[in-house]
Image: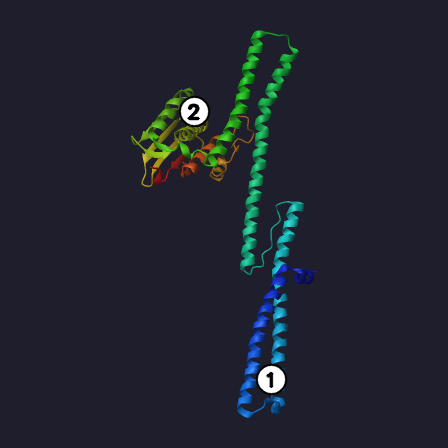
Amino acid sequence: MLLAKTLQSSTFRLALIAIAAFGLIVAAIMAYVYFGTVAYVESRVGDAGDHGGFAAMIELAMIAVAVLLAVLAGLAAVLVTRRTVGRIEEINATSRAIMLSGLDQRIPLRGSHDEWDRVAENLNQMLDRIETLMGEVKQASDNVAHDLRTPLTRMRGRLEKAYHAPRDSESDASLIGDTIADLDAVLGMFASITRISEIETHARKGAFRSVNLVEIASEVVELYDAAAEQDATRLGLEGDAEVRLTGDRDLLFDAIANLVDNAIKHGRAGGRVIVTCKNGEAGAVISVADDGTGIPADQHDRVFKRFYRLEQSRYTPGNGLGLSLVAAVASLHGAKIELRDNAPGLLFRLSFPAASA
């Protein structure tokens, strides 16, 4: 089967063409040597016809060499092409298995560490990445369905109850208000998704300007001061008086606001949330620290995925998009995100490159 595919492959035909070209060159060289030898003998000892045995011996040697070269070239072409076709068939077989059974199949490696093994390794890594992304898409779809089901179910229940109940202006107004609130939550979720996608495509770089990070952080602290007081949380701003960088002011405001909002929600009641802005050696740095329960170390990378929430039951308010937006804004500005144990609590740090300063 493999031999038949080898003989039918385009690689084998190309090998034959290369061998034929090589054979013509060798034949020309051999003809030149043959006729040159005969001419030399004739010039030295006279007519070559008197030395037929010598000429016949040279002809036989030339024919033997030509046949040997043809056989060796044919064997080399078959062996090289067979090896190439064999590796291609392994890739094709794995591709067919993936199409039939799923992304868990991988191309086998032979351990030769040659170019074919490197191709197989790259394809396997690509399959690993695709499988990871597909898993994230499935998880995000499940989370979206879960987050949408609750408000939609509440809205349907209210409307059905109102449909069967006698009209009452006060209760109808309350129902309309609650339904609008749930609709706003759903629309806010989709707006966040659209906003993150827009940021990830770097479509917002046209709004980059020189901004003062301290001024933006101060506005965020002022905005969330009332929410912090409700939980008896002390919210403060520390650091340098001015920290300048080049970026999108609105997006930076949203990113800092999400970090502060998370710190207040998940921090300790009656605790402390500190926003710090300073000029680092490499560029501008802003951090948001709380003294709550923190995030387990094995969850640090996952919290930035869309719709991911530490609370798997997903009954508390939120949609798991806040930190995804922070990650998108950081990527747009070339900033590095760090999560550190604040002992107790958690510290989020955004470090902007010097080019942004």
| For discs 2 and 1, the disc positioned in front in the rendered view | 1
User: What amino acid is found at the position of numbered circle 2 in the picture?
Assistant: Ala
Residue lying at 59% horizontally and 36% vertically, measured from the top left: 138
Q: Does 96 sit above or below residue 74?
A: above
Residue 351 horizontal/vertical position (percent): 37, 38
Q: Does 21 sit above or below residue 310?
A: below
User: Which disc number belongs to residue 269?
Assistant: 2
Q: Earlier in the sequence, mark 2 or mark 1?
A: 1
User: What amino acid is found at the position of numbered circle 1 in the picture?
Assistant: Ile
| Residue closest to the eye, 288 or 251 | 251
Residue lying at 55% horizontally and 85% vertically, measured from the top left: 39
| Viewer can see residue 342 | no
For disc 2, the neighbor class at 10 Å (few under 14, some 14 to 19, many from 20) is some
Where is mark 1, residue-wise?
58
- In the picture, residue 52 is in which quadrant? bottom right
| Viewer can see residue 88 | yes
Residue lying at 63% horizontally and 51% vertically, measured from the top left: 94
The outermost residue toward the left is 241
Residue lying at 56% horizontally and 51% vertically, measured from the top left: 123
- In the picture, residue 48 is in which quadrant? bottom right
**In 3D space, how far apart are the residues under numbered discs 2 and 1 (Cα atoms)?**
103 Å
Q: Does 186 sit above or below residue 173?
A: below
